[in-house]
Image (spheres, rainbow, N blue to C red):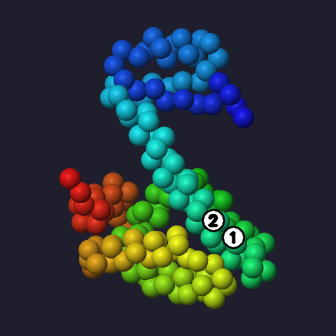
């Protein structure tokens, strides 16, 4: 445990003196911006990513262990290890635009394999459903070109994950 050395984000109006005091007293605090709640939102959205990956990893690792291939599954992550984690996630969001349909089809086969291994494919089925949402939105570009990250997020926000 890192205690007070755990990095902290702080957001809100007139919080600069608080951040300065924290850093002067052994904390590691960074001023995010003046919008109250943004620091909490950053931490929550980080948790969405990490806890979601955690749940996927548990599902996959149990299946891999049951099949006697855990070492091989861990070993084939070299392409991910070679890049930054955030860069890998951004690349997945970009390529999602082009490859959602192929990935959706793959996940339905994966779910069946997990069931045959005795693993309830809870996360895999939700991933399959998420991919299907993109397929149904018809976002795949006719030219097959992978968009830049900001364009991919715009497409996903406007055409797939609609709200408000």
Is label 2 in a helix, a strand or a loop?
helix
Picture disc at residue 61 = 1
Percent x, y for residue 90?
46, 57
Location of the N terminus by quadrant is top right
Residue visible at 78% across and 72% down in the picture: 71
**Residue at (24% x, 66% y) in the render:** 159
The residue drawn where x is 58% and y is 31% is 7
Q: Categorize mark 1 by other alpha carbons within 10 Å: few (<14), some (14-19), many (20+).
A: some
Kindly report the distance in space between the C-alpha atoms of the residues bearing marks 2 and 1: 6 Å
Q: Is residue 30 above or below residue 141?
A: above
Residue 123, percent from left and from top: 52, 70
**CB of mark 2 within 8 Å of CB of mark 1?**
yes
Q: Could you say where residue 160 lies in the image, as x and y percent from the top left? A: 28, 66
Camera sees residue 87: no
* Residue 57: mark: 2
- Looking at the picture, tell me which residue is in the foreground, 120 or 73: 120
Q: Secondary structure at mark 1?
A: helix
Above or below, 153 against 66 in this view is: above
In which quarter of the view is residue 27 placed? top right
Q: Is residue 19 left or right of residue 84?
A: left
The percent position of residue 150, horizontal first and vertical second, equals 33, 54
């Amino acid at each position: 445990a890192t205690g007070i050395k755990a990095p902290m984000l702080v957001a809100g109006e007139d919080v600069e003196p608080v951040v300065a005091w924290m850093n002067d007293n052994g904390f590691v605090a960074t001023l995010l911006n003046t919008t109250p709640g943004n620091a909490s939102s950053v931490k929550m959205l980080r948790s969405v990513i990490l806890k979601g990956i955690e749940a996927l990893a548990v599902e996959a690792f149990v299946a891999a262990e049951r099949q006697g291939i855990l070492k091989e599954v861990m070993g084939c992550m070299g392409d991910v290890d070679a890049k930054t984690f955030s860069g890998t996630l951004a690349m997945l969001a970009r390529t999602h635009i082009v490859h959602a349909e192929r990935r959706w089809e793959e996940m339905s086969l994966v779910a069946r394999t997990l069931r045959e291994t005795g693993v309830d494919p809870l996360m895999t089925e939700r991933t399959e459903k998420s991919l299907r949402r993109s397929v149904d939105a018809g976002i795949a570009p006719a030219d097959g070109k992978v968009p830049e990250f900001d364009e991919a997020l715009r497409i996903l926000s406007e055409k797939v994950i609609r709200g408000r």
